[in-house]
Amino acid sequence: MSAESTVPLSDPVVLLPYPAAEIPGLPGGVEVHTFDGAACDGRPGPPPAELLARVELLVVPYLRTGTVLPLLPAMERLRVVQTQTAGVDDISPHVPPGVTLCNARGVHDASTAELAVALTLAALRDIPGFVRGQEREEWRSGFYPALADRTVLIVGYGSVGAAIEDRLRPFECEVLRVARTAREAPAGPVRSLAELPELLPLADVVILAVPLSPQTRGLVDSAFLATLRDGALLVNVARGPVVVTDALLAELTSGRLRAALDVTDPEPLPAGHPLWHAPGVLISPHVGGSSSAFLPRAQRLIGAQLTRFAKGEPLAHVMPTG
Protein backbone atom coordinates (compact mmCIF):
# COMPACT_ATOMS: atom_id res chain seq x y z
CA MET A 1 0.00 0.00 0.00
CA SER A 2 1.12 3.59 -0.60
CA ALA A 3 2.52 5.67 2.20
CA GLU A 4 0.61 8.82 3.08
CA SER A 5 1.47 12.33 4.20
CA THR A 6 -0.67 15.11 5.63
CA VAL A 7 -0.14 18.58 4.18
CA PRO A 8 -2.52 21.07 5.77
CA LEU A 9 -2.97 24.01 3.43
CA SER A 10 -5.55 26.62 2.43
CA ASP A 11 -5.81 28.45 -0.88
CA PRO A 12 -2.73 26.71 -2.30
CA VAL A 13 -0.87 27.90 -5.39
CA VAL A 14 -0.29 24.99 -7.78
CA LEU A 15 1.62 24.64 -11.04
CA LEU A 16 0.06 22.13 -13.43
CA PRO A 17 0.80 20.96 -16.97
CA TYR A 18 -2.91 21.32 -17.85
CA PRO A 19 -5.40 24.19 -17.69
CA ALA A 20 -7.69 24.16 -14.70
CA ALA A 21 -10.70 23.43 -16.93
CA GLU A 22 -9.18 20.05 -17.88
CA ILE A 23 -8.86 18.79 -14.29
CA PRO A 24 -11.99 16.93 -13.14
CA GLY A 25 -13.10 17.66 -9.61
CA LEU A 26 -10.78 20.63 -9.17
CA PRO A 27 -11.52 22.03 -5.70
CA GLY A 28 -12.35 25.65 -5.09
CA GLY A 29 -9.83 27.97 -3.51
CA VAL A 30 -6.91 26.68 -5.57
CA GLU A 31 -4.87 29.14 -7.59
CA VAL A 32 -3.85 27.29 -10.75
CA HIS A 33 -1.00 28.23 -13.08
CA THR A 34 0.07 26.23 -16.11
CA PHE A 35 3.44 25.08 -17.42
CA ASP A 36 3.60 22.01 -19.66
CA GLY A 37 7.36 22.06 -20.25
CA ALA A 38 7.02 22.93 -23.93
CA ALA A 39 7.80 26.60 -24.55
CA CYS A 40 7.01 26.43 -28.26
CA ASP A 41 4.12 26.79 -30.69
CA GLY A 42 3.03 29.92 -28.89
CA ARG A 43 2.87 28.25 -25.48
CA PRO A 44 4.39 30.18 -22.59
CA GLY A 45 7.74 29.34 -21.05
CA PRO A 46 8.35 28.87 -17.32
CA PRO A 47 6.51 31.18 -14.92
CA PRO A 48 8.38 34.21 -13.56
CA ALA A 49 10.43 33.88 -10.40
CA GLU A 50 7.91 35.76 -8.27
CA LEU A 51 5.24 33.21 -9.14
CA LEU A 52 7.55 30.21 -8.72
CA ALA A 53 8.30 31.44 -5.21
CA ARG A 54 4.61 30.99 -4.33
CA VAL A 55 4.12 27.50 -5.78
CA GLU A 56 3.22 24.92 -3.14
CA LEU A 57 2.36 21.94 -5.35
CA LEU A 58 4.01 21.05 -8.64
CA VAL A 59 2.75 18.47 -11.13
CA VAL A 60 5.65 17.43 -13.34
CA PRO A 61 4.94 17.56 -17.11
CA TYR A 62 4.79 14.06 -18.56
CA LEU A 63 8.09 12.98 -20.17
CA ARG A 64 9.53 16.47 -19.60
CA THR A 65 10.99 16.18 -16.12
CA GLY A 66 14.15 18.00 -17.20
CA THR A 67 12.18 21.18 -17.85
CA VAL A 68 11.20 21.61 -14.19
CA LEU A 69 14.45 20.64 -12.50
CA PRO A 70 15.99 24.13 -12.95
CA LEU A 71 12.81 25.67 -11.47
CA LEU A 72 12.85 23.75 -8.18
CA PRO A 73 15.35 26.02 -6.34
CA ALA A 74 13.07 29.02 -6.93
CA MET A 75 10.05 27.29 -5.40
CA GLU A 76 10.60 28.48 -1.85
CA ARG A 77 7.19 27.34 -0.60
CA LEU A 78 7.10 24.01 -2.42
CA ARG A 79 5.51 21.25 -0.36
CA VAL A 80 4.52 18.56 -2.84
CA VAL A 81 5.83 17.24 -6.16
CA GLN A 82 3.37 15.04 -8.04
CA THR A 83 4.68 13.03 -10.98
CA GLN A 84 2.65 11.57 -13.83
CA THR A 85 4.84 8.48 -13.94
CA ALA A 86 4.97 5.38 -11.79
CA GLY A 87 8.77 5.50 -11.67
CA VAL A 88 10.34 8.48 -9.91
CA ASP A 89 14.03 7.71 -10.42
CA ASP A 90 14.47 10.74 -12.70
CA ILE A 91 13.24 13.30 -10.17
CA SER A 92 13.61 11.76 -6.72
CA PRO A 93 17.26 12.88 -6.26
CA HIS A 94 16.27 16.47 -7.05
CA VAL A 95 13.33 16.88 -4.68
CA PRO A 96 14.31 19.36 -1.93
CA PRO A 97 14.42 18.10 1.66
CA GLY A 98 11.07 18.21 3.39
CA VAL A 99 9.10 18.16 0.13
CA THR A 100 6.65 15.29 -0.36
CA LEU A 101 7.02 13.29 -3.57
CA CYS A 102 3.99 11.40 -4.96
CA ASN A 103 3.99 9.08 -7.95
CA ALA A 104 1.21 8.24 -10.41
CA ARG A 105 0.46 4.73 -9.19
CA GLY A 106 -2.43 3.33 -11.19
CA VAL A 107 -2.30 5.82 -14.05
CA HIS A 108 -0.24 3.60 -16.36
CA ASP A 109 -1.47 0.17 -15.26
CA ALA A 110 -3.88 -0.45 -18.13
CA SER A 111 -1.65 0.93 -20.87
CA THR A 112 1.55 -0.76 -19.71
CA ALA A 113 -0.20 -4.08 -19.08
CA GLU A 114 -1.67 -3.98 -22.59
CA LEU A 115 1.75 -3.44 -24.10
CA ALA A 116 3.36 -6.16 -21.97
CA VAL A 117 0.83 -8.69 -23.24
CA ALA A 118 1.07 -7.36 -26.81
CA LEU A 119 4.86 -7.69 -26.81
CA THR A 120 4.63 -11.18 -25.35
CA LEU A 121 2.17 -12.37 -27.96
CA ALA A 122 3.96 -10.64 -30.83
CA ALA A 123 7.31 -12.14 -29.87
CA LEU A 124 5.96 -15.65 -29.30
CA ARG A 125 3.93 -15.76 -32.52
CA ASP A 126 6.70 -13.98 -34.50
CA ILE A 127 4.55 -11.07 -35.66
CA PRO A 128 7.71 -9.13 -36.67
CA GLY A 129 8.61 -12.04 -38.97
CA PHE A 130 5.17 -11.90 -40.56
CA VAL A 131 5.58 -8.16 -41.16
CA ARG A 132 8.94 -8.75 -42.84
CA GLY A 133 7.40 -11.58 -44.83
CA GLN A 134 4.58 -9.35 -46.01
CA GLU A 135 7.07 -6.73 -47.18
CA ARG A 136 8.86 -9.44 -49.18
CA GLU A 137 5.65 -11.19 -50.31
CA GLU A 138 6.65 -14.35 -48.43
CA TRP A 139 4.04 -16.78 -47.04
CA ARG A 140 5.56 -17.86 -43.71
CA SER A 141 3.33 -20.71 -42.68
CA GLY A 142 4.21 -23.18 -39.93
CA PHE A 143 3.79 -23.78 -36.22
CA TYR A 144 4.60 -21.00 -33.74
CA PRO A 145 4.73 -20.91 -29.93
CA ALA A 146 1.47 -20.04 -28.17
CA LEU A 147 1.03 -18.33 -24.85
CA ALA A 148 -1.43 -21.04 -23.79
CA ASP A 149 0.09 -23.64 -21.46
CA ARG A 150 3.16 -21.47 -20.79
CA THR A 151 4.48 -20.38 -17.41
CA VAL A 152 4.80 -16.60 -17.07
CA LEU A 153 6.86 -15.10 -14.26
CA ILE A 154 6.01 -11.49 -13.40
CA VAL A 155 8.96 -9.84 -11.64
CA GLY A 156 7.62 -6.73 -9.93
CA TYR A 157 4.13 -7.50 -8.68
CA GLY A 158 2.82 -4.04 -7.90
CA SER A 159 -0.22 -2.44 -9.50
CA VAL A 160 1.25 -2.80 -13.01
CA GLY A 161 2.20 -6.42 -12.39
CA ALA A 162 -1.29 -7.20 -11.11
CA ALA A 163 -2.81 -5.50 -14.17
CA ILE A 164 -0.61 -7.64 -16.41
CA GLU A 165 -1.85 -10.80 -14.72
CA ASP A 166 -5.46 -9.65 -15.11
CA ARG A 167 -4.92 -9.52 -18.87
CA LEU A 168 -2.98 -12.79 -19.00
CA ARG A 169 -5.65 -14.81 -17.24
CA PRO A 170 -7.81 -15.56 -20.33
CA PHE A 171 -4.77 -16.93 -22.19
CA GLU A 172 -4.68 -20.18 -20.19
CA CYS A 173 -1.15 -19.75 -18.87
CA GLU A 174 0.25 -20.25 -15.38
CA VAL A 175 1.40 -17.08 -13.63
CA LEU A 176 4.12 -16.83 -10.98
CA ARG A 177 4.53 -13.60 -9.03
CA VAL A 178 7.59 -11.96 -7.50
CA ALA A 179 7.91 -8.73 -5.52
CA ARG A 180 10.47 -7.25 -3.16
CA THR A 181 8.92 -9.11 -0.24
CA ALA A 182 6.68 -12.17 -0.12
CA ARG A 183 2.99 -11.75 0.58
CA GLU A 184 -0.44 -13.08 -0.29
CA ALA A 185 -2.35 -11.35 -3.09
CA PRO A 186 -5.94 -11.91 -4.24
CA ALA A 187 -4.62 -13.79 -7.29
CA GLY A 188 -2.31 -16.02 -5.25
CA PRO A 189 1.03 -16.08 -3.43
CA VAL A 190 3.68 -13.49 -4.26
CA ARG A 191 7.23 -14.72 -3.77
CA SER A 192 10.21 -12.58 -2.78
CA LEU A 193 13.09 -11.46 -4.99
CA ALA A 194 15.33 -13.73 -2.95
CA GLU A 195 13.41 -16.71 -4.38
CA LEU A 196 14.12 -15.83 -8.02
CA PRO A 197 16.85 -18.46 -8.53
CA GLU A 198 14.37 -21.28 -7.92
CA LEU A 199 11.60 -19.68 -10.01
CA LEU A 200 13.51 -18.61 -13.12
CA PRO A 201 14.08 -22.17 -14.45
CA LEU A 202 10.29 -22.69 -14.39
CA ALA A 203 9.47 -19.72 -16.60
CA ASP A 204 8.82 -19.70 -20.35
CA VAL A 205 8.22 -15.94 -20.22
CA VAL A 206 9.64 -13.44 -17.73
CA ILE A 207 7.95 -10.03 -17.62
CA LEU A 208 9.86 -7.27 -15.81
CA ALA A 209 7.70 -4.62 -14.12
CA VAL A 210 9.94 -3.53 -11.24
CA PRO A 211 10.79 0.08 -10.38
CA LEU A 212 14.39 1.13 -10.90
CA SER A 213 16.18 1.13 -7.54
CA PRO A 214 19.60 0.15 -6.19
CA GLN A 215 18.15 -3.32 -5.59
CA THR A 216 16.85 -3.77 -9.16
CA ARG A 217 19.55 -1.98 -11.19
CA GLY A 218 21.39 -4.72 -13.05
CA LEU A 219 19.06 -7.36 -11.60
CA VAL A 220 18.93 -9.19 -14.93
CA ASP A 221 22.59 -10.03 -15.32
CA SER A 222 24.48 -12.99 -16.77
CA ALA A 223 23.63 -15.22 -13.81
CA PHE A 224 19.92 -14.34 -14.00
CA LEU A 225 19.79 -15.03 -17.74
CA ALA A 226 21.81 -18.23 -17.49
CA THR A 227 19.20 -19.63 -15.11
CA LEU A 228 16.43 -19.27 -17.70
CA ARG A 229 15.50 -22.30 -19.76
CA ASP A 230 16.47 -22.43 -23.44
CA GLY A 231 14.05 -20.51 -25.64
CA ALA A 232 12.66 -18.37 -22.80
CA LEU A 233 11.34 -14.89 -23.60
CA LEU A 234 12.32 -11.83 -21.55
CA VAL A 235 9.83 -8.92 -21.70
CA ASN A 236 10.93 -5.60 -20.17
CA VAL A 237 8.33 -2.90 -19.51
CA ALA A 238 10.18 -1.64 -16.42
CA ARG A 239 13.38 0.40 -16.92
CA GLY A 240 16.31 -0.26 -19.22
CA PRO A 241 19.02 -0.43 -16.52
CA VAL A 242 17.21 -3.29 -14.80
CA VAL A 243 18.82 -5.43 -17.53
CA VAL A 244 22.57 -5.63 -18.18
CA THR A 245 22.55 -5.01 -21.92
CA ASP A 246 25.81 -6.80 -22.73
CA ALA A 247 24.64 -9.90 -20.88
CA LEU A 248 21.35 -9.91 -22.78
CA LEU A 249 23.13 -9.34 -26.09
CA ALA A 250 25.29 -12.40 -25.48
CA GLU A 251 22.23 -14.59 -24.93
CA LEU A 252 20.38 -13.16 -27.93
CA THR A 253 23.38 -13.54 -30.21
CA SER A 254 23.74 -17.18 -29.22
CA GLY A 255 20.07 -17.74 -30.06
CA ARG A 256 19.34 -19.25 -26.65
CA LEU A 257 16.94 -16.55 -25.45
CA ARG A 258 14.53 -14.06 -26.99
CA ALA A 259 13.50 -10.61 -25.78
CA ALA A 260 10.76 -8.01 -26.22
CA LEU A 261 11.89 -4.64 -24.89
CA ASP A 262 9.93 -1.44 -24.37
CA VAL A 263 12.92 0.02 -22.53
CA THR A 264 16.63 -0.23 -23.17
CA ASP A 265 19.96 0.81 -21.72
CA PRO A 266 21.05 3.16 -23.24
CA GLU A 267 17.82 4.94 -24.07
CA PRO A 268 16.89 6.13 -26.58
CA LEU A 269 18.75 3.31 -28.27
CA PRO A 270 21.26 5.01 -30.60
CA ALA A 271 21.58 4.18 -34.27
CA GLY A 272 24.13 1.47 -34.87
CA HIS A 273 23.68 -0.16 -31.45
CA PRO A 274 23.93 -3.98 -31.80
CA LEU A 275 20.68 -4.47 -29.88
CA TRP A 276 18.72 -3.11 -32.85
CA HIS A 277 19.62 -6.09 -35.02
CA ALA A 278 20.22 -8.82 -32.45
CA PRO A 279 18.41 -12.04 -33.34
CA GLY A 280 15.17 -12.74 -31.52
CA VAL A 281 14.56 -9.23 -30.21
CA LEU A 282 11.49 -7.01 -30.59
CA ILE A 283 11.92 -3.36 -29.56
CA SER A 284 9.29 -0.69 -28.91
CA PRO A 285 10.34 2.90 -28.07
CA HIS A 286 9.34 3.18 -24.38
CA VAL A 287 5.64 3.65 -25.04
CA GLY A 288 4.24 1.50 -22.25
CA GLY A 289 2.40 4.40 -20.67
CA SER A 290 2.03 6.59 -23.75
CA SER A 291 -1.42 5.70 -25.01
CA SER A 292 -4.90 7.19 -25.10
CA ALA A 293 -5.48 5.66 -21.66
CA PHE A 294 -2.96 8.01 -20.05
CA LEU A 295 -4.51 11.48 -20.09
CA PRO A 296 -7.91 10.84 -18.49
CA ARG A 297 -6.34 8.75 -15.73
CA ALA A 298 -3.60 11.30 -15.07
CA GLN A 299 -6.07 14.18 -14.88
CA ARG A 300 -8.35 12.25 -12.54
CA LEU A 301 -5.40 11.53 -10.25
CA ILE A 302 -4.37 15.20 -10.24
CA GLY A 303 -7.91 16.29 -9.39
CA ALA A 304 -8.11 13.82 -6.53
CA GLN A 305 -4.70 14.80 -5.15
CA LEU A 306 -5.51 18.51 -5.34
CA THR A 307 -8.72 17.90 -3.39
CA ARG A 308 -6.76 16.10 -0.67
CA PHE A 309 -4.11 18.80 -0.72
CA ALA A 310 -6.58 21.69 -0.41
CA LYS A 311 -8.43 19.98 2.45
CA GLY A 312 -5.27 19.05 4.32
CA GLU A 313 -6.05 15.35 3.92
CA PRO A 314 -3.44 12.60 3.56
CA LEU A 315 -1.97 12.47 0.06
CA ALA A 316 -1.88 9.20 -1.88
CA HIS A 317 1.13 7.45 -3.39
CA VAL A 318 3.84 9.13 -1.32
CA MET A 319 7.32 7.98 -2.26
CA PRO A 320 10.67 8.00 -0.42
CA THR A 321 13.10 10.73 -1.50
CA GLY A 322 16.81 11.34 -1.25
Image (spheres, helix red, strand yellow):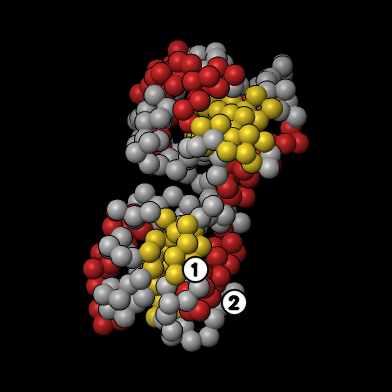
Question: Depth check: 129 or 90 in front?
Answer: 90
Residue 226 position (above or below residue 68): above
Question: Depth check: 6 or 215 in front?
Answer: 6
Tell me if mark 2 has few (under 14), some (14-19) or many (20+) residues whose alpha carbon lies within 10 angstroms of its own.
some
Question: Depth check: 128 or 312 in front?
Answer: 312
Please tell me which residue is depicted at 29% across the width and 53% down the height of the picture.
322
Q: How far across and down, in percent of the image, does residue 11 sit?
A: 43, 85
Please tell me which residue is depicted at 50% across the width and 25% down the height of the picture.
196
Residue 87 visible? The answer is yes
Is 306 on the left-hand or right-hand side of 37? right
The residue pinned by badge 1 equals 314
Please tell me which residue is depicted at 64% across the width and 41% down the height of the picture.
185
How far apart in space, not on screen, are marks 2 and 1 (Cα)?
17 Å
Please tell me which residue is depicted at 42% across the width and 73% down the height of the picture.
7
Is 240 on the left-hand or right-hand side of 72? right
Which three-letter amino acid code belongs to the residue tagged 2?
A: Gly
The residue pinned by badge 2 equals 25
Residue 34 visible? The answer is no
Question: Depth check: 135 or 77 in front?
Answer: 77
Q: How far across and down, in percent of the image, does residue 279 sit?
A: 48, 20
Q: Earlier in the sequence, mark 2 or mark 1?
A: 2
Snapshot quadrant of residue 51 = bottom left
Snapshot quadrant of residue 226 = top left
